[in-house]
Image (cartoon, helix red, strand yellow):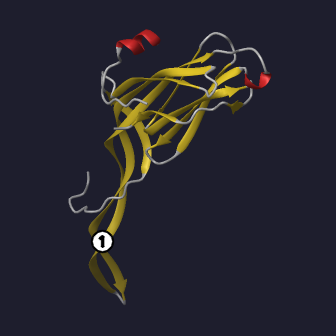
Amino acid sequence: MRFASRILLGAGVAALFATATPAMANAETVTPVQTVAATTSADPFYADSWGPYYSGDKKAEAEGKVTVEKKSEKKWYWKKYHKIVKKCTWYKGEKKCKWVKQWFKKRAWKWEDTYHYTVDSKLTNHKWWGKPRHFCAWETFKVVGFDGSTTFKSFKNCSKRPGFYSFSGKDAEHIYVKVGRGNHGHFNGYQSGWENIYSHA
């Protein structure tokens, strides 16, 4: 596996893919409400090729590239704050007042960095004939997010011509790929191990 951080696409990859707050406020609680895209850098935060990786029988081959763009987004949230206010009550015809702390909230925003990734792949099927159980090439990607969540994305190629695939998302801590064989419906044999194709720096 290869790791790279903050570099431009190499010639090898290009050849492979032509493709207000009140004065007395002193407490704040953040609750996400809405995200609005704002700015992005002209150069990618990360760009590098990966692979090739093979199925256990060497009949399926996968390679590609990962590109990550760092963006600054305006994130809306509820800002909670308190003020010292005067509260008055009437008791037996007499007005009594005291100063108390009272909580309020308002919509506010802040800039937040997000990392938008795109994974491109070229999946080659070196044996598209034979037993139906294993005449397709398969690849499965596993994405682990900043929050620890895990998602999967799979592609298959049952023809003799290479297949080109792509998917995108944001805020990935790690991205892995596994290559193997299968039929039209299932990834069911000759699976490689998980190969790390991206780790957030």
In this rendering, position of residue 45 left or right of residue 174: left
Q: Going by the picture, which residue comes out furthest to the front?
A: 57
Residue 194 location (% of width, % of height): 54, 36
Q: Residue furthest left?
A: 23
Horizontal relation, residue 109 to residue 145: left or right = left
Relative to 74, residue 15 above or below: above
Residue at 36 percent of width and 58 percent of height: 29
Residue 142 in sight from this viewpoint:
yes
When the figure is inspected, residue 10 is found, relative to residue 173, above or below; the finding is above
| Residue at x-position 63% and y-position 28% | 180
- On screen, residue 34 above or below 124: below
Helix, strand or loop at label 1? It is strand
Q: Amino acid at mark 1?
A: Lys
Q: Position of residue 4 (x, y in %)?
A: 34, 29
- Name the residue nearer the viewer: 89 or 127: 127
Write the residue at 44% across / 42% down.
34
Asked if residue 18 shows in the view, the reply is no
Q: Is residue 174 above or below residue 80?
A: above
Q: Quadrant of residue 162?
A: top right
- Front residue of 176/109: it is 176
Q: Position of residue 48 (x, y in %)?
A: 39, 23
Judging by the rendered image, the residue that carries numbered circle 1 is 101
Q: Position of residue 83 (x, y in %)?
A: 27, 65
Find the residue positioned furthest to the bottom.
92
